[in-house]
Amino acid sequence: MLVAAAVCPCPPLLVPRIAAGAAAELEALRAACADALSVLAASRPDRLLVLGPVTGTGAVRHAGGASGGFHGFGVPLSVRLARAGQAEPPRAADDGAALPASLAVGAWLVEKAAWAAAPVSGLAVGEESGTEACLALGESLRVPDERLAVLALGDGSTTRTVKAPGYLDERAAPWDSAVAKALADADTEALAGLDPVTARALGCAGRAPWQVLAGAARGADLTGSLLYEEAPYGVGYFVAAWS
């Protein structure tokens, strides 16, 4: 069963070596992510699943020890889904691919938190996956007698300002506000109701992972807390903790 969840954004700029001189601008976001990870550790899980978006449809599982990095951003930094001292031997993802960028950021957050609570695995879900498929995938994660914690990664709209990556869309701010409220309330039905077409138009990569989380959390009776809600660079970023 799902015992806790943390929701964090996954811009590579979270990694200070990538942000370089602008690293301080996201320090509050990094601190909020660390606080959310501490909630996961406190839940005493049997397993941590790092869940993030990837281009396309479907889902790819990444076993403990799967590696990735940020060489594509000009930074020779590698990460892997592992917990110090008890990780599985390093190996490739189940499809033979390295971790996608979202899971690489998640792995970096886990490493930064000095995670030592439970084994770690990953799940990349296609941004184009339909709502019902996402909810069903989330429901399939529930294993009786297993205490599961989830780190769900995903950004909000990329259209909050004229300088945003997707330019300005007047629907973006209300969309992000609705997402923030759903995350704050651990409202699985509100997350399940997010429209994939609107999400795509607003450049919201987090919709699919959030709906997988909603499927996993149905019936778990978790309560939520919103730790961060801002739109630096015109992109909606949220941090929430469910326990």
Image (cartoon, helix red, strand yellow):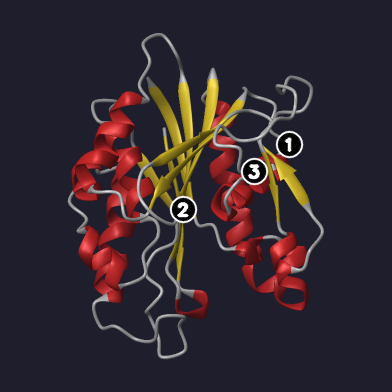
First along the sequence among labels 3 and 2: 2
Seen at 18% across and 43% down, the residue is 189
The residue carrying mark 1 is 114
Under mark 3, the amino acid is Ala
Q: Residues within 10 Å of mark 2 (few under 14, many from 20)?
A: many
Distance from the alpha carbon under mark 1 to that under mark 3: 11 Å
Outermost residue on the bottom side: it is: 162
Q: Which label number is shown at residue 107?
A: 3
Q: Position of residue 214 (x, y in %)?
A: 29, 39
Q: Under tag 2, what secondary structure?
A: strand
| Quadrant location of the N terminus in the rendered image | top left
Could you tell me if the residues under marks 3 and 2 are in contact, i.e. CB atoms within 8 Å? no
**Is 60 in front, or is 16?**
60
Q: Residues within 10 Å of mark 3 (few under 14, many from 20)?
A: many
Under mark 2, the amino acid is Val
First along the sequence among labels 1 and 3: 3
Q: Residues within 10 Å of mark 1 (few under 14, many from 20)?
A: few
